Amino acid sequence: MIRQIARHWPETEILLRADSHYCTPQVLDLCDRLGLRYIFGLSKNGRLAQNISALEASTAARYVRTPGQKLRRFKTFSYAARSWSKPRRVIARVEVGLMGQDTRYIVTNLEGGRGKHLYEKLYSARGQAEKHIKAWKAHLAADRTSCSKANANQMRLMLHGCAYWIWWKLRAACPKRSPWRRAQFDTLRLHLVKLAATIVEKKTRIIVTLPASCPRKGLLLLLFDALAPPKTA
């Protein structure tokens, strides 16, 4: 896939982002060879712990002085595992809170940027991408390809993809500071679609009459107005 992207869009910059399961010497060397940027999770070990023992101790001491307020600190250093072909940039995140102390590591070939920014804004953001995939697969049943022919399953995936963007558009039309703006698709479907209504199909339009006691009437009216097609002159 990387080779195909590079062949068709040679100017496109590719950044690989993944957890520690993918952080192998072969993958790191492949990224260097193909000129790819990467930011991977890195498994803990004793040698890594030696680099941040002082930071862990000082962070724990700070937390004792201000209990209840979670502390998070970062340290960047150069590290080379025995199986690596060269030293690489490693960022450690040390966090102390009510649940105790937690330390995580990432490795990257990105030269600029502070460790805090790279960890919180780039690496941790992959969790949001996973939520998008979850919404598509779980809430829209997009992983169900039960047809006997490949073309039919491809059509199903295309329809599920269209449904995803429809729900995305609907959620984006909700008020910015309302909980609906962050609701999952199955929650929106339960409250905004699974409603009793009278549908009358006429020659030029379809009339949907909602019950007067609809609990989401105000939100539905707002969405109907926000998503209505532009009026022609």
Image (tube, grey):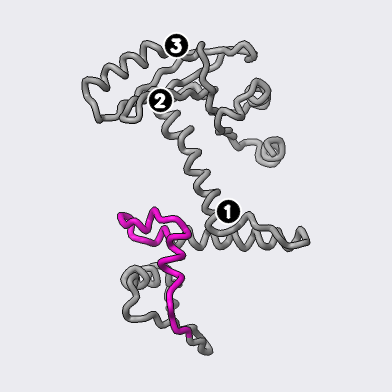
Residue 40 x %, y %: 55, 28
- In this picture, residue 6 sits left or right of residue 140: right
Reading the image, the residue beneath label 3 is: 51
Callout 3: 10 Å neighbours few (<14), some, many (20+)? some
Kindly identify the amino acid type of the residue bearing the numbered disc 3. Answer: Asn
Quadrant of the frame with the C terminus:
bottom left
Reading the image, the residue beneath label 2 is: 102
For residue 88, what is the image quadrant? top right
Q: Nearer the viewer, residue 140 or 158?
A: 140
- In this picture, residue 65 sits left or right of residue 142: left
Furthest-right residue in this view = 149
Callout 1: 10 Å neighbours few (<14), some, many (20+)? some
Callout 2: 10 Å neighbours few (<14), some, many (20+)? few
Which residue lies at the image location 66% right of the left edge and 62% below the top edge?
A: 156
Q: Nearer the viewer, residue 228 or 93?
A: 93
- In this picture, residue 81 sits left or right of residue 4: left
